[in-house]
Image: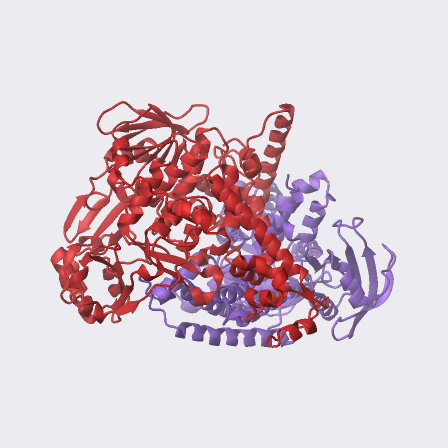
Chain colours: A purple, B red
Amino acid sequence: MLPISAVCGGIYRAAIRTLGTRNVPLCRRLSSGDGVLAGLADADTIFALSSGHGRCGVAVVRISGPAATTALRCMVGLRKHLPPPRTALLRSITDPHSKEVLDRGLVLWFPAPHSFTGEDSVEFHIHGGPAVITAVLQALGSVPGMRPAEAGEFTRRAFHAGKLDLTEVEGLGDLIHAETEAQRRQALRQMSGDLGRLYQDWSHRLKRCLAHVEAFIDFSEDELIEDGVLDRVDISVCDLQAEINQHLKDERRGERLRSGVHVVIAGATNAGKSSLLNTLCQRPAAIVSPIAGTTRDVVETALDIGGFPVLLSDTAGLRDSPDLVEQEGVRRARERVQQADLTLVVVDSTILPSEVKQAGAVLLKHLESVLTSQEQPEAGRCLLVLNKTDLLPEAQREQLSLGLRGTSGLPPVCLISCQTSEGLKDFLTVLQSTVQTMCADPLSGAPTLTQARHRAHLQQCAAALAQYWRYRDSDLALAAEGVRLALTGLGRITGRVGAEEILDIIFKDFCIGK
Amino acid sequence: MSRMLTRKLLPVRNILPPVTKRASHVHRQRYDVIVVGGGHAGTEAAAAAARVGAETLLVTQKTHTIGALSCNPSLGGVGKGHLVREIDALDGLCGRAGDWAGIHFSILNRRKGPAVWGPRAQLDRQRYREFIQAELLSTPRLEVLEGSVEELLVTDPNPEEPGRHRVTGIRLANGSRPISASSVVLTTGTFLSGSLFVGHTVSPGGRIGDAPSSTGLSQTLRERLGLRVGRLRTGTPPRVLKDSVDLSLAKLHPPDSHPTPFSFMNTRTRCKPEEQLPCYLTYTTPGVERVVRESLHLNCHIQQDAKGPRYCPSIESRVLRFPGRRHQVWLEPEGMTSDLLYPQGLSMTMPPDVQLRLIREIPAMHRAEIHTPGYGVQYDYVCPTQLSPALQVKNTQGLFLAGQINGTTGYEEAAAQGLWAGVNAARWARSLPPAGLSRTESYIGVLIDDLVSRGVNEPYRMFTSRAEFRTSLRPDNADLRLTQKGSLLGCVSSARRDEFLRVKLRLQDAEAALRALTLSPAGWRKMMPGISVSESKNGTLSGMDLLQYKDVSFEMLASLFPEQLSPHIEFSERLKIEAVYKPHCDLSKREVERIQKEENMSLPQDLDYFSLPVSLSKEVREILDRFRPSTLGAATRLEGMTPAAVVNLLNYVQIAERKERMMNRSNAGQQEGRGEDLCARNASLPQ
């Protein structure tokens, strides 16, 4: 009998590996080779920030697995004795290599099986600033045998150890779904920038390297594949290695990702999206005019809502336009909606039919066209904002606000008027509680975690490329294995590469005659 | 060592005639297994089924062509050689037949690492056929019948198991009584609705010189069983008279000076090293490209849109896809005494007179004469996603398919499937649970898994790059990977089992001896001054560690420690390979175990995914319904599966298994089959 537990590790991992493949339904593809039972690989020790983020005084970093004590020893200076179990100690936390003090915080040690995951666990309670958190996560990543946790991996290990009760187990599928979704959005944001392009470029070049080595292995004896092929692979591998190592050394790490819950305002033209943005940030960040199609690009602004960091984006109104600039704006708007943690769909309430049922139907249809993802609008991921209520007769306003509440399939509805600020206070309360819920989830809007994970995979990739050189002249099969492992490492960021894809490149680049 | 060799290598006591003698009538009206087709898949299937213990009948159109090499006169190569070694480890025929019939042996990729060495041989067509026919004849429980199968007999779907037919036997074309069987293995190659193409001429058939197969079979598959079929094409080059070719204008390509046998049971080949024949290499010229272009309008086959292989393309597709460059043409001997040459790389389908013009554009063949023109074949294949990993048609109990009918190309790919289908057909007939081969343990497993879980859209050929665990699936260790399993399944002779056990024990002894030799790095440096031995973690290094060094051979260590190591010199090459690869294999071990577990969790084939009471999206339900994965592992590899869906599916499987176990417990004292430990998981759910 297979332990139930052994089950889900790969799922999380699988979900993450597929992240970042271009275009649509990222989370819907389970990359092959990343099975359900990757839990067998539990010898790894995982770590993650397990507290929420935003304005918080204390952050909790959790470590679970056999090497947890190693981390404790080399980062807290407890060389000889482990601290007494389940007792908080105030300690300096240092980088294991540079010995630099990163922070001073509480350290707790939970020996197996008396921990959340049932494994040896350690918790660091450190100061909540992003710099400290990043430094500690990176230091942990450099301890041998440690890697950043995948979505929900702690929960899975708890499940593994029989630490969850039956109702919690039943919800596991949904939990995994929610967490992989959160990570997918996070990675999408990261991958759509320069960094994403860089990783894609590496992946592309690595694929060609592998294809050419494989062609040389599978075909060269009887085919016209010249020895020069391998020389070109040598150059390519050499370049890639240098670039990846340079990138890993680069403290700036390319681009800064904004932390916070990503809230996107979307809707048809002239619904009052930019007015809402301006109202929310209490300054004219976006140009507002009665002319439809005024906003053509994404306008982004950082906000603080109830103490939580929010990145608010205003987008171009969605409509078919012959104007090329506006078309691009609409494309970007749709992209933003896909990456958003929360979408505020703004609707001009004056265009709604006066009959409530009909209005509900119109709104449902409208939502579908705005949130193009095939997903059902997930609970808590969308708010419907009916604007311009000052232009409605009082009776209709009341009907709408009461009637729509009961319509199934509709997200929470807020009636506001940006013009008169009517209903704004209620809307802010709803928005704040939604953002608060989201911030409690350490996964949404935490680029440090994604970065730490990427870093770990890139390190794997660079190490694997070294294997290419070790065997380049003595055993090409093992050298190719190095390139293959490197591509697997990178594939966890950019999406998995299958054998067929490699064969496609081979047949495109070479005339195979036998 | 040569003791077991001579016996196995020379089993051909009564060559050829008796086959036809036995072929005129059948001895019984009921068999356990009937195999249709006598090609590479069919012969392996029949022999394997009989080895496993089934009363087996092989039906073929012409007994004379059993074991014929319809296309190239060669066996093995990179990837394909791996398959031959694995087939041999399971006591299949083709490895030993290759050692008997080979006339030019070489190991491809010799410089590129043992994991990708490709054992290969040019074959004598006549000798290959002789061996296969004699071997089939001497196989107990196996009968051969000459005839054409008119109809496949299947029951109507069982109302209790919706949509599931059961095979009951076959009916021959001559109108005789039906012959019944529990299992039928179809290995009809290119004969399923096959058409032959030469220039503008199209005629029905699967191979030139053979009668076309009946349409009844293909009709049963398509209409009665509702199987989805696709169309593929392939081709073969003209055969050229050796005397008409000026071989001095081609480059001589000698064989290895010491032929390496395919079979683990042989230490030498029938052909003596010095008797081997060479191959010749030459190239196409711009004239060849011109002739192809000028004759395109005369070339029916090339204008069709059935998918041909990208890796064994006709000369037409080669010059059209990569114009303006020269292409290799290998001139290969067809046999020890044959007066023909096989121009590998010149597969073509233009009219015969144009074929002659084309080959004469190549200097070495400027006066060549064609013996038989090249031709193209288009044929139906059954989309293999409709098969289980045992190669059984999912909706028809007892019906197995193997070889080109499943969309593969190549002798070795066909033979591998044939063997496994034969084993499983016999198991089905004897009510044993299906046996599976994992992609983590063999290329055969990779082949079958790729076919049944992903399907094909062009003829499928094996490449080493398809095997993700290439470092452990090596030609040298195929016996260690498979012979024991084969022995448990009953498809391995006692002689092979004994030899395997001997080798396994000796290897273990040798490894233990190497590990027992421990010295400090400084000690080793003193013993072997030329080697730059690095420091080790725990202060000592074993002989096994030293053997990992590029410049250290087992012979070197044996000369330093003759007492401990010289008894093991027989295995010096295998030990060296094992030492180098072991650390890499260990790294992937966890991944291997994970995949094996997933593959061992089977999903019932008759599961109604649309009404399954678990939380799955409509999209996922449709995917599952379309592909009907046999195991959780296969489900995981489907495009479009979500992580959450897999967890939910897994929960379902586990609940079903728990119920099953509880039922089993209540029937305590039940006896267990011999193959139980191998197949337990597959058996635990109703198929």
Which residue shows up at 13% across the image and 63% down it?
B357
Residue at the image position 52 percent from the left and 57 percent from the top: B570
Q: Which of the 4 image quadrants contains residue B674? A: top right
Image position of B132 with respect to A231: above or below: above
* Closer to the camera in the image, A441 or A33: A33
Which residue is nearer to you in this view: B179 or B630?
A: B179
> Does residue A235 appear left or right of residue B177 in this picture?
right
**Residue at the spot x=67%, y=60% of the render?**
B516
Residue A374 point in image, percent of width and height: 50, 49
Q: Is residue A338 visible?
A: no
Give the vertical position of B380 relative to A64 (above or below).
above
Describe residue A152's horizontal placement relative to residue A355 as left or right: right
Residue A199 location in percent, x, y? Answer: 53, 68
Whether residue B102 is situated above or below residue B183 in the rendered picture: below
Camera sees residue B130? yes
- Residue B292 sits above or below residue B168 on the image: below
